[in-house]
Amino acid sequence: MAQPTIAVFTKNRLNPAYDAARAAADRVAGEAGARTIHYVPATPDDVGEQKALVAEALRAGVSGVVFNPTDDAAMREDLERFAAAGLPVAVFINRMDGPALTFVGSDDIAIGHAVAKALIARLGGQGRLVALDGTPSARTARDRAEGLRRAVAEHPGIALVDSRVGYLQRAPARAAMEELLAKHPRIDGVWTANDMMAFGALDALAAAGRKAEVVGINGLPEAIANIERGAMLASADFSALNIAAIATRAVLRHLDGRPVPKEILVPAELIDRSNIARWKVPMIDRPCPRWDEIVRRP
């Protein structure tokens, strides 16, 4: 068989988690004698640009695709274009409907719930929360917000008083948090759908001279440092590196004629000061998981 070429689609170059995902795809492909081509919109999370990149990948004659969609609904037709070309696609991180080989991700509702529970526990079950939600077009963000809502419903002493969309990026999250601080004289806790937005929330809190407990998701190195020094309460090890590694392995297994399950969930663990030492290795330097470490069946 000729050297396989794997097209790797990520949503932007702003989030360090995607840097780790691209590095994981490169490492896994290299181990198998394959190569990667990366397709990243110049404008972060831009649907139109990602559609144009799909056309580019199809023209390039790639062997398979590892695909993180900018919008789970808008990119459905593009997933169908890959299928029509006979290309195996591992959708990763953001779940979407359509003809894919597999989906590789984590239980985002459970993750959103877990970090919310940590925040609520820190507040003793009493307090006023605000939320910085992710991009509405990202199903992973919508599911994490559902986890938050479920946690709040379990604790009558907790009020989710307001929310804003922070678009999973630092600068928009800071602007959103500034709006929330101006509107609400008391905020006890800030739930964010990813670490980049947690950083934006911390920036806004510091500029306003205000304090609140802040949680995020991704386990980024800056989040680990913030947790260690007490600026953030917790994050979750939603590892883009692990997820992208398994998604790449899935495509390569299929090309090798081996079975791949339709869904693969990669475990994610809550990170706080009690267990932080395990995550102090830079994300991009962490080992890629083997297939049998994550997948217990074909």
Image (spheres, grey):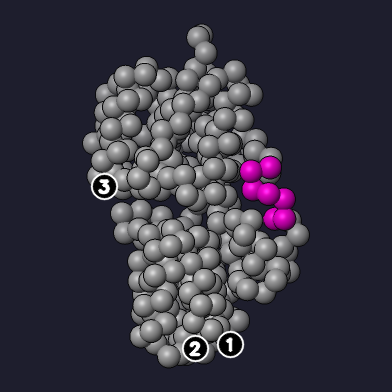
**Badge 1 density bin: few <14, some 14–19, many ≥20, Cα 10 Å:** few
Q: Which residues are magenta?
A: 279-285
Q: Position of residue 268 (x, y in %)?
A: 58, 55
Residue occupying image coordinates x 39% and y 63%: 172
Q: Which mark is residue 124?
A: 1
User: How many neighbours does mark 3 have within 10 angstroms: few (below 14), some (14-19), or many (20 or more)?
Assistant: some
Q: Secondary structure at mark 1?
A: loop
Distance from the alpha carbon under mark 3 to that under mark 1: 39 Å
The amino acid sitting under disc 3 is: Ala
* Relative to 271, 87 lies left or right: left
Which comes before the other along the chain, label 3 or label 1?
Answer: 3
Going by the image, does 132 lie left or right of 281? left
Label 2: element kind: strand
83 relative position to 113: left or right:
left
For image coordinates 23% across by 36% down, the residue present is: 77
The residue indicated by pointer 3 is 73
Front-lying residue, 82 or 258: 82
CB atoms at circles 3 and 1 under 8 Å apart? no
Question: Which mark is nearer the camera, 1 or 2?
Answer: 2
